[in-house]
Image (spheres, grey):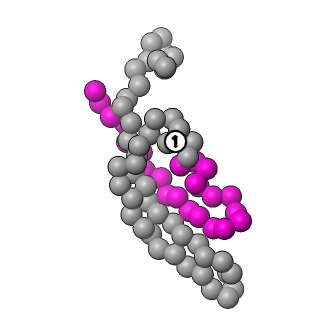
Amino acid sequence: MPKERKAIVVHYEPGEDNATDELNALLNDDWTIVTTAAMGGAGSEAMPGTHFAALVVLEREEKKTVGGFRAA
């Protein structure tokens, strides 16, 4: 069966809205992580706290549709 692929950048900063919510939603929707790549992290006096980012590639089995509706 064909697979769908998607790439997202997950950004994490303590105490902020983060893309981890988007990643969790995708994982709950049958997506699985194929690979990840760190994109670095930073912290400074001007920007306290540590910031991280990663490229995450996901895939899932392509869901068939019937009359425009996805099969469960």
Q: How many labels does the image show?
A: 1
Q: Is residue 47 magenta?
A: no
Q: Residue at x 48, y 11 (%)?
A: 67
Percent position of residue 66, x then y: 45, 12
Q: Name the residue under label 1.
A: 26
As drawn, the residue found furthest toward the right would be: 15
Counting from the top left corner in percent of width and height, residue 54 is at 47, 63
User: The residue under label 1 is which amino acid type?
Assistant: Leu
Task: Give whichever of 61, 6 is nearer the camera.
Answer: 61
Label 1: how many Cα within 10 Å (few below 14, some 14–19, many 20+) = some
Query: Percent x, y for residue 26?
Result: 52, 42
Provide the secondary structure element on which disc 1 rests: helix
Outermost residue toward the top in this view: 67
Q: From what the image shows, is residue 13 above or below residue 60?
A: below
Q: What stretch is highlighted in magenta?
A: 1-23
In the image: residue 70, left or right of residue 43:
left
Q: In which quarter of the image is residue 2?
A: top left
